[in-house]
Image: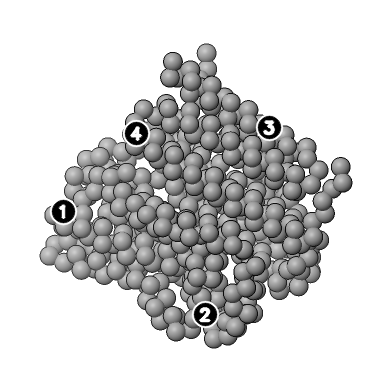
Amino acid sequence: MLELVAASLIGLGAVFFIAGTVGLLRFPDIFCRLHALTKADGLGLALVALGVALLSGSMGDAFRIGLIWFFVAVASATCSHLIARYARASGEAVSDD
Amino acid sequence: MTDPLVIFDLLLAASVVALAVAVLGVRDLFAAIVLFVIFGLLSALSWVRLSAPDVALAEAAIGTGVTGALLLKTLHHLRFVSGTLDQQAALSVTPLLPVPGAVIWANAAFCGLITLGLAAAFLGAPQAGPGFDPLVADAMPQSGVEHPVTGVLLNFRAYDTLMEVVVLLAAVIAVWQIERGMSDAPAPVMGEVWQGFARLALPAIVVVGTYLLWVGAEAPGGAFQGGAVLAAVGLLLLLTRAYVPRPAHRGIARGAFVLGTGAFAAVALLVAGGGRVAFEYPPEHAKSLILLIEGLVTISIAITLAALFHGREPVALSTQGGRNDT
């Protein structure tokens, strides 16, 4: 039962990652791409981390996975902010469509 | 039915080779660096699949993290020197003069020779043998540590590790000599979100780096991995300008550079004598000696890598408008 829940969480996370990647490839300008990537990957990572933590079986491992999730989430949000900031400062065009 | 992980391994191997080709083929230098970092991360994953977590940690921390930061810093410097720092169009810095054909062919010949040598070494190695595993396992009780990789690196083959530390020392000496008098590209202004991230990440990095050093005695980890992670503290401090290198700090920095090599060599020579050769630690003190060496080498590695990121030695001007974090 637990494995089923974990597997469906990881699968759902993978779907979000794929959606984020499709957004990265299909969206017209850098800001739209960042928008798709950060939201979808953040949720995907959270779901995968939750699924793996359920499978890990020990509180210590689950705590470490939680820490990894926290720092990856914070670092990727900061990175996306820095990319968007640089793009805006250097006059990256926003597409019309 | 084949193991599904075989498919994963094949995909991983194909991706690593494809990324290597892409790094060499792409014209845009920034794209090349990003591809190189992804290449390093997948290499680290490959080492995990080969059951070599120590190498994976070193590859991720030094080969990817620190090297990626050094490459990006170099690109920033190149753009500054070529006057294309603020131009989005000039993402790639093209060389002013075309590279002579002789240089290309000489490089190709050297790379080919190295490849041939590696292939010869690989084919000449014993195909199916026990390797050195039983020898290391037999000698582990005398090594003073529980983790075989640390035992080999800091006891059985400590001479090789000393040479690795010397290489780092030589690199930082060369950088300080070559970059003497070169103009420095202004550090990019990173903004408030970055400052907040640095405040959050700094204590965590210190804990992780120290943990990697300490856990090296019984699990994957050690001086190089811990040192590379702790070097990230230096990078964060430099990039947030919480620490600005000053000429007065040169003496301390020089001392820190040679600390690891000096301590390592001193211990090696001091244990010699009384029927023992260099690096032959007395078994009852092996653990504390290894821990002493690893601790000092970690400090040295962390400060050396951070200094390499900063580049040239600090000089007395640093009136670059101070902090204007907007």
Cα separation, mark 3 vs mark 1, equals 57 Å
**Viewer-nearest residue: A86 or B176:** A86
- Same chain for the residues under marks 4 and 2 in the image: no
Q: Nearer the viewer, mark 4 or mark 1?
A: 4
Query: Mark 3 and mark 2: span between their CA atoms?
Result: 47 Å
User: What is the count of numbered marks?
Assistant: 4
Q: In front: A27, or B179? A: A27
Q: Is residue B22 left or right of residue B160?
A: right
Instruction: Say which amino acid is labelled 2.
Output: Pro
Q: Can you identify the residue that label 4 sits on?
A: A59
Callout 4, which amino acid?
Answer: Met
User: Are the residues at dot 3 and dot 4 in contact (C-beta closer than 8 Å)?
Assistant: no
Secondary structure at badge 4 equals helix
Residue marked by disc 1: B283
Q: In the image, is residue B126 above or below residue A80?
A: above
Q: Chain of mark 3?
A: A
The structure residue drawn at horizontal position 65% and vertical position 74%, both measured from the top left corner, is B185
Crowd band around label 4 with a 10 angstrom C-alpha radius: few (<14), some (14–19), many (20+): few
Image location of residue A81, percent across then percent down: 64, 53
Secondary structure type for disc 2: loop
Q: CA separation, marks 4 and 1? A: 37 Å
Q: Are marks 4 and 2 in contact (CB under 8 Å)?
A: no
Query: Which chain letter matches label 1?
Result: B
Establish whether labels 3 and 4 are both on one chain: yes
Q: Amino acid at mark 1?
A: Pro
Q: Residue beneath label 3, please?
A: A19
Q: Are marks 4 and 1 on the same chain?
A: no
Tell me which chain the residue with mark 4 is part of.
A
Q: Amino acid at mark 3?
A: Ala
